[in-house]
Amino acid sequence: MNWKKVLLSVVLGVVVIFGAIFAYMVLTTRNHSPADTATYSSGGLTATVDYCRPYKKGRVIFGAQDEGALQPYGKYWRVGANEATELELSKDVTVMGSTLKAGRYVIYAIPDKSEWTVGFNTDLGRWGYSEVDYEKDVLQVKVPSMALDEPIEQFTIDFASQGEDIIMNLKWDNTLVPISIRPI
């Protein structure tokens, strides 16, 4: 048998095996953290968030690392699971008073006890837990976090209207992070 055919067969076999493993991982993680979309549309603005929704499952979600928190304070979080959470805006807006142009952005956060840093970044198409390329940040804002009376079992992003503002709520466990968005 020709050594080139043997080598090609081995390479193809390895590619097929790794492809199957990757597909299995993607499909099984989606069972644990299903994909969802939150949308707001009014006055010519459409805001769409594509994200994956992990469950609390009895874990401490946000807190100190020595408490065993899933997401320790002061550390990068991709705001969900699986693929990076992405926000698409049809119009220019302000976010917590700072301008963000129409477009599609990865949303990430650095949670803390009373205030989160929320970033908007153009490092699109990301999968898995790895920090964004911070050179591609277009905006970072500080957002006060609030304690909820009742815990939220599954991570949720939703929108609410509040006067001229749209509030994009990040909710999980006992934490609410209301991000104020205003069309320009």
Image (cartoon, grey):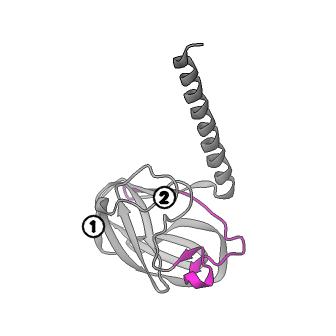
Q: Work out whether residue 138 or residue 136 is closer to the camera in this orientation and state it.
A: 136
Q: Nearer the viewer, residue 43 or 32?
A: 32
Q: Quadrant of residue 43?
A: bottom left
The vertical placement of 49 against 63, above or below, is above
Q: Which residue is drawn at the image coordinates 31% and 67% (left, top)? A: 139
- Marks counted in the figure total 2
Query: Which stretch appears magenta?
Result: 43-72
The amino acid on which the numbered mark 1 sits, given as a three-letter code, is Thr
Name the amino acid type tagged 2. Answer: Thr
Bin the neighbour count of mark 2 within 10 Å (Cα to Cα): few under 14, some 14-19, many 20 and up. many
Local crowd size for mark 1, using a 10 Å CA cut-off: few (<14), some (14–19), many (≥20): some
Coordinates of residue 155 in the picture (x, y in percent): 60, 67
Residue 129 lies in the magenta-colored region? no
From the image, which quarter does the N terminus lie in?
top right
How far apart, in angstroms, are the residues tagged by discs 2 and 1?
20 Å
Q: Which residue is mark 2?
A: 85
The answer to whether mark 2 and mark 1 are in CB contact below 8 A is no
Q: Is residue 180 visible?
A: yes
Q: Quadrant of the C terminus?
A: bottom left
Q: Is residue 139 left or right of residue 86?
A: left
Residue 70 belongs to the span the image colors magenta: yes
Residue 33: % across, % down: 64, 58
* Residue 123, percent from left and from top: 37, 54
Single out the residue that lies furthest toward the right: 58
Residue at the spot of label 1? 99
